[in-house]
Image (cartoon, rainbow, N blue to C red):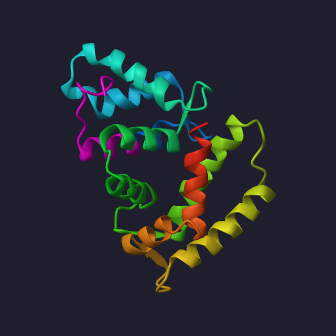
Amino acid sequence: SSLTKNISVSEVELRNLLNQFKVVSDDEGLLDRANFDMVVRNSITKRFDSSIVPAFHRIYEAFDMDGNGRIDFFELATGMSTLLYGDKKEVLQLLFSLFDVNKDGSVEQEEMLDFFKKYYLGQSKMNGYKLTSSRWKSLEEHLKRLFAATDLDSSGTIDYDEFLKAVRDVDHPLGMLLLSMEQEHQM
C-alpha cells in the first residue's frame, strides 16, 4: 500500500515497538498520538529521517479503528501485523508472541490474563463503562476456563501448536474470542 511502501519494519523492531507500547501506554492500556509518536521514534525511526514521520501519523489514524483518538494494544498489534504481514500465519505468530510475554515459547495462564486485562481495560474506557472488580472476576473465570480448554496436554502452559488449534477452530472459545475482537475493531 502507498501508506507503507517506504516503511519496512523488521520483526525485531516490531517486538521493540510492542514492548515500548507496554511501557508507555497508560493505566488503561491506551496510547495517545504523542505517546504513539514516542513509541515509533524509540523503536523504529532511528534509521529513518524525519520525512517518514507524516506516514506514521497516517498509520496512527488508520490504527485508531474506533476513532477515539487513542490506540489500544489490539489496534496496534493488528495494525502493525496487517501492515507488515499479509500472511495469516505470521499474524498468528505475532499474536502468540503478544501473549508470550517472557518469550519462552509458551503462554502461561498469568500471561494470557495480563494480555486480556489490558485489552478489556482499553475496551471499557473506549465504550464508557467501568471494568469493576466483579466484572473482571467473571471475565477472569471465563479466561481461566478458556485457558484450560486450550491447554490440551494439561501442562499448565499453551504451546504454539495448541494455540493454533484453538484459534483456527471457530467453535473453540479462544477462536470465538479472537474472532469477536477482530469484528469489534472492523466496525
Q: Quadrant of the C terminus?
A: top right
Location of residue 158 (image quadrant): bottom left
* Residue 71 x/y as whole percent: 53, 33
Which residue sits at x=43%, y=75%?
A: 162
Location of residue 97 (image quadrant): bottom left
* Residue 19 x/y as whole percent: 39, 45
Which residue sits at x=63%, y=41%?
A: 122
Query: In the image, is 168 to the left or to the right of 183?
Result: left
Is residue 172 shown to the viewer in this render? Answer: yes
* Residue 75 x/y as whole percent: 50, 39
Q: Quadrant of the N terminus?
A: top left
Which residue sits at x=56%, y=55%?
A: 179
Above/below status of 130 relative to 176:
above
* Residue 134 x/y as whole percent: 80, 59
Above/below status of 51 relative to 4:
above
Query: In the image, is 73 to the left or to the right of 57?
Result: right
Above/below status of 14 relative to 92:
above
Is residue 35 shown to the viewer in this render? Answer: no
Location of residue 7 (image quadrant): top left
> How many callouts does the rendering have?
0
Which residue sits at x=24%, y=26%?
A: 5
From the viewer's side, name the closer residue of 153 and 130.
153
- Residue placed furthest toward the left: 47
Magenta-span inclusion, residue 2: yes
Query: In the image, is 1 to the left or to the right of 29?
Result: left
Magenta-span inclusion, residue 153: no
**Magenta-highlighted residues:** 1-19
Query: In the image, is 47 to the left or to the right of 173?
Result: left
From the viewer's side, name the closer residue of 84 and 12.
84
